[in-house]
Structure formats: structure tokens, C-alpha cells
Image: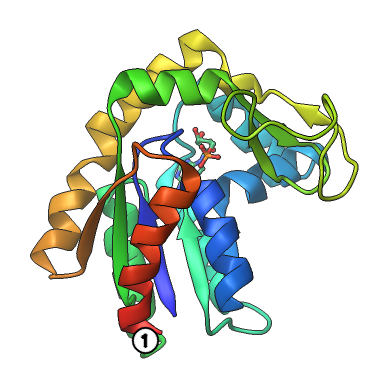
Amino acid sequence: MKIILLGPPGVGKGTQAQQIARDYTAKHISTGDILRDAIKKETQLGRKAKEYMDKGELVPDEIMLGLIEETLFGGHPKANYILDGFPRTLPQAEGLTALFRKHNTEIDRVILLEADQDEIVSRLSARRVCANCQAVYNLHTNPPQQDGICDQCGGRLVQRKDDQKETILKRLKVYAEQTAPLIDYYRDKGKLDPVDASGSPDEVYTKLKKILGKIS
Ligand code: AMP
């Protein structure tokens, strides 16, 4: 299973990807998580990425394409994965298609999660993530059992710096300008499955499972 989860920030890609990864023994690959980890470890990649991420801007394509090639095909190539947050621009999508071709493989489906802007801003403002294992919570719809503590690993829950109001609006603008064109790109390839993501995580997951049932 090789799938891409496409959709604006805050639509629930990370939450759904974690669930799919658990149920289908696939690897959840979030480029945002990889970059945040690089920032935490203060690597060269982390230092470069931070200046873009803090402003809600995209990290340059050549950096991201190198990172994804290493992640997918370096070391032990992975058979089953869910890409969350990649590709995010047309050059990234084209680069990914070329990379798959080079490795004689292809993406199965691209699932587009859609929700309206007010819903997204409200979700992002209430989002908290585990600083240790990256599990995602929502203070209103999916709160942790104990305030500020991750149910899964006991780690500390934090608000991402880029989940503050100003940066959220900037990220939505970047999505509309740079990432939304990928919808047509994958629709034209006959790979796109749009899903209404305005319901609860469980409701959305039920819809996803129907699509995943056809490919796994
Ligand atoms: P995310 O966790 O997917 O919302 O990503 C957080 C931030 O990481 C984004 O706002 C970008 O600055 C950066 N980022 C993650 N994935 C990509 C990508 N594929 N291309 C460029 N920047 C990315």
C-alpha cells in the first residue's frame, strides 16, 4: 500500500495517517515530523528548515526531494506507507513521480481530505501534539485523559509554534497557492479520491477504510 494524504493543514491528515498505519501495518511518513525532529536534534537540515517553518512557509523543493528519496528508498526501502505532507508543490509531485518510475513502483491512491476554512482554523488552534511520540490531540474533540500528558507514552503535550493564528492563516494561503494545484495533477492521473473530512476522526476513518479496502 502506497498512498498520499493530501489536504490543507489541520484537516486531519496526521490523525488519519496514524490510524491507517496501525491497522494496515504501514509506515506513517510525515515530512513535517521529520523536519521537526531534525530541528530538535539541531542538524544542518533542521537549522535550514526552521527558518521557513516558523514563518509558515514551505521548505525549498530540492531539500524536500532529497529528504523523501532518502526516506523512501535509502537503507531498507519500504513497501507500505502513507505520505502525509508530501508532496506539497507541483515540482515535488513531479519529482516524486520520477522517483517512483526510477524505482519501478507507483502510488496506489491519493486521498484528498477536505473541510472548510473555519473548521480548519478551529481545529489547528485546539491541536496539541506529544513532544515525544508526535501523537495528535484536539482539546475539544479528542482531549488527553490527563491534562497536558500524552495517553500513549506519557510525554508532554505542546502547541506547535506554527499553530498560532497568524501562522495558520499564512499556511492556508500557502496551501491554496502551492499545494491545491496537486488536486488536478492527481485527478488527471485518475488517482484522486476526495473525502469529506468535516466529521469526527472516526467518521472520516470509516470513509477512508472503504477506499483502502479496494487497494489492500
Ligand atoms: P506539517 O506538519 O505537514 O503541517 O508541516 C509543517 C511545516 O513543515 C510546513 O508548514 C512546512 O514549513 C514544512 N514542510 C513539511 N512538509 C513539507 C513539504 N513537503 N514541502 C515543503 N515544506 C514542508
Q: How is the image coloured?
A: rainbow
Indicate the quadrant where residue 194 lies: bottom left
Which image quarter holds the N terminus?
bottom left
Write down the residue under mark 1.
105
- Observer able to see residue 85: no
107 above or below 8?
A: below
97 above or below 148?
A: below
- Left or right, 113 with respect to 63, comes to left
Image point 56% across, 53% down: which residue? 30
Number of numbered discs overlaid on the protein picture: 1
Image point 43% across, 34% down: which residue? 9
Image point 49% across, 16% down: which residue? 167
Q: Residue furthest right?
A: 154
- Left or right, 53 with respect to 101, comes to right
> Callout 1: helix, strand or loop?
loop
Type of amino acid under label 1: Thr
